[in-house]
Image: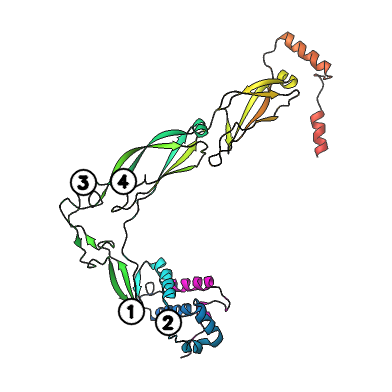
Amino acid sequence: MTKRDYYEILGVSGDASPGTIKKSYRQMALKYHPDRNPGDRESEDKFKEAAEAYSVLIDPEKRSVYDRFGHNGLRGEGFGGFSGFNSSVFADFEDILGSFFNFGFENIFGKSHQRGTNKPSRGRDLALELDLKLEDAVFGTEKEIKITRTELCPECDGSRMKTGTEKSVCSHCQGRGQVRYQQGFFAISRTCSECRGSGEIIPFPCKDCRGTGKTKKKKTLTVKIPPGVDNGTKLRLEEEGEAGDQGAERGDLYVITHVKRHKFFEREGNDLYCEISIPFTKAALGSTIEIPTFEGAEPLRIPEETQAGQTFRLKGKGIKDLYSHRKGDIFIKVLVKTPKNLNKEQKKQLRRFAEFMGEKLEDVDKSISDKFKDII
């Protein structure tokens, strides 16, 4: 029987890259794998055919021989079909299938490739949100937090067994941690459902933790908040998460900061923004005012003829960067106050000033509408 072209089997072109070949084979392995098509002889044949094509095209030497001489050239090189896998290609083959089906297996020629039993799992990571004032973010601080997390059971010390008892070998898998099934041309090994891969059974579980080896406990921790944290900053406390299984390491605790809004400052990155109102006279004639900062009051010179909305900067008076320690700035937007509750004399003086400036208060001011006409 004439064999089909390997490139045609995998649906790739003759110049396909190894990545393309692997991707196409992965798709075919998923589609035709015996696990997904039990009892389907045609799917089994296609799966075997794709595996043979992949083993040749993924191997640079065999692919080169095949490209020049076809199937006959491979016979001259001693390739006898599916048995021609070398160890590196078979490991790659196992990696592709194992990542999807989570099994160890033996190929049809008896070479065993087991994925091993379950190892003790590392403890889960925990996350906690922490509210801070802007002052805390500026200077850094220490905060006490309370969490509830799993700890090793003090009664059995995480062994899960009742004191004075021992584990026994799992009768379902005979202590191997895996159960072997014959399916098609594969012998598939699955994790034992009775012992969950450990190979051992606990006949007398600890009553305090009900055989889990863990209990829930409240814990108080002190967290150091460095200067410069912002909304969403994630601080990692190593091995302060959940306890691991059977002596495995703890998980980590992540503290995620949330900085509350400030009454005076708005924050953007490491810069601070604020608005201040000054009298018309100070804006017109100039003055020096004090700006509050987190390091104390700072003088700010307001020059003559300052306009409403004008912005000034205090350099290096903002927030220290969390990583570079460079400090941001403070930006001050000036608002001009209109005087209220004027008496007769004050109004009289303002009218005299307006006349002196050539302003006619009773006339309709058309300057704004005239500017609009120029725009459109």
Task: Answer whether labels 3 and 4 touch (C-beta < 8 Å).
Answer: no
**In this figure, which residue is indicated by the disc labeled 3?**
155
Which numbered disc flags the more N-terminal residue, 2 or 3? 2
Q: Earlier in the sequence, mark 3 or mark 4?
A: 4
Q: Amino acid at mark 4?
A: Thr
Query: Which residue position holds label 1?
Result: 110
Q: Say above or below: 222 vs 39.
A: above
Type of amino acid under label 1: Gly
Mark 4 nearby-residue class (10 Å; few <14, some 14–19, many ≥20) = some
**Between marks 2 and 4, how big is the CA–CA gap?**
51 Å
Q: Amino acid at mark 3?
A: Glu
Can you see residue 32? Answer: no
Query: Relative to 205, does residue 330 appear above or below in the rendering?
Result: above
Q: How many marks?
A: 4
Tell me, for residue 150, which label it has, or none. Answer: 4
Please provide percent x and percent y for residue 371: 81, 33
Q: Which image quadrant: the C terminus?
A: top right
Q: Residue at (72%, 18%) from the top-left corner?
A: 281
Closer mark to the observer between disc 3 and disc 4: 3
Q: Quadrant of residue 103?
A: bottom left
Give the x, y percent position of residue 201: 21, 60
Marks 2 and 3 in Cβ contact (< 8 Å): no
Q: Is residue 175 above or below residue 137?
A: below
Q: Which residue corresponds to the image point at 68% horizontal and 30% vertical from the top-left?
A: 311
x and y percent of residue 77 in the render?
47, 87
